[in-house]
């Protein structure tokens, strides 16, 4: 039992270690948990933290008691199958093939449902009905892609999970001055 108290004391005393700051011979700031003559004690009682903003997925609810057969919204299952999340795409022209998984098929005859494509939160073109399409002239870098099913009035019925992809394009060489 005595050994348990010694171990607990060591653990809790090390959790409250002090931090010191001083300048070395080259003038650089150095931090350590060991005291050096001339070092000042740094107060680290309140450490900064980062909490990311949650990405909210809108939910569309239809009350079946009040809905007629014409008003019922299909239970769309929507996903982006290509490009895959965190995939690096090499396309010098900036054109990217996108494939969307969707069940059931879009009800675009009776309800007028279509797909809206967003790259980095910006809509790309008008609403479409195809599950295979091409994004054109995308800049190099990292981008986020989402696809939404919307009805004839533009109301969002379903949003896919975001897919992040990285586009690599060759840079044009700069002309060297003579």
Image (tube, rainbow, N blue to C red):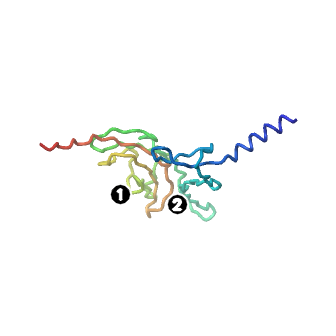
Q: Secondary structure at mark 1?
A: loop
Please identify the residue farthest to the right as the structure is shown. Answer: 1
Q: Position of residue 133 (x, y in %)?
A: 35, 46
User: Could you say where residue 135 lies in the image, as x and y percent from the top left?
Assistant: 34, 47
Residue located 79% across and 40% down the image: 8
Q: Which residue is labeled 2 in the image?
A: 70
The residue shown at (30%, 41%) is 169
Q: Position of residue 98 (x, y in %)?
A: 38, 43
Pick the front one: 92 or 29? 29
Question: Which residue is found at the position 58% from the left and 63% from the top?
Answer: 67
Please, which residue is most extreme toward the front here?
37
Q: Is residue 150 left or right of residue 67?
A: left
Instruction: Looking at the picture, tell me which residue is in the foreground, 176 or 124.
Output: 176
Q: Residues within 10 Å of mark 1 (few under 14, many from 20)?
A: few
> Dot 2, how many residues are within 10 Å of its Cα: few (below 14), some (14-19), or many (20+)?
few
Image quadrant in which the N terminus is located: top right
Residue at label 1? 126
The answer to which of marks 2 and 1 sits earlier in the sequence is 2
Q: Which mark is residue 30?
A: none
Q: Does residue 79 appear left or right of residue 173 in this picture?
A: right
Residue extending furthest left? 178
SS of the residue at dot 2?
loop
Residue 171 in the image, given as x and y percentages of width and height: 26, 42
Q: Residue at coordinates 56% horizontally, 58% vertically from top-left? A: 59
Q: Taking 65 as reference, is 138 left or right? A: left
């Amino acid at each position: 039992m005595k050994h348990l108290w010694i171990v607990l004391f060591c653990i809790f005393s090390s959790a409250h270690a002090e931090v010191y700051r001083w300048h070395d011979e080259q003038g650089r700031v150095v931090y350590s948990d060991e005291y050096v003559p001339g070092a000042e004690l740094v107060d680290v009682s309140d450490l900064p933290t980062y909490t990311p903003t949650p990405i909210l997925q809108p939910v569309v609810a239809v009350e079946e008691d009040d809905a007629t057969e014409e008003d019922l919204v299909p239970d769309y299952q929507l996903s982006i199958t290509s490009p895959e999340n965190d995939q690096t795409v090499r396309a010098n022209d900036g054109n990217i093939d996108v494939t969307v998984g969707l069940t059931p098929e879009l009800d675009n005859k009776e309800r007028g449902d279509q797909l809206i494509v967003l790259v980095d939160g910006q809509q790309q073109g008008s609403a479409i009905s195809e599950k295979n399409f091409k994004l054109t002239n995308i800049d190099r870098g990292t981008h986020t892609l989402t696809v939404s099913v919307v009805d004839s009035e533009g109301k969002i019925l379903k949003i896919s999970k975001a897919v992040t992809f990285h586009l690599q394009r060759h840079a044009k060489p700069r002309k060297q001055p003579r």
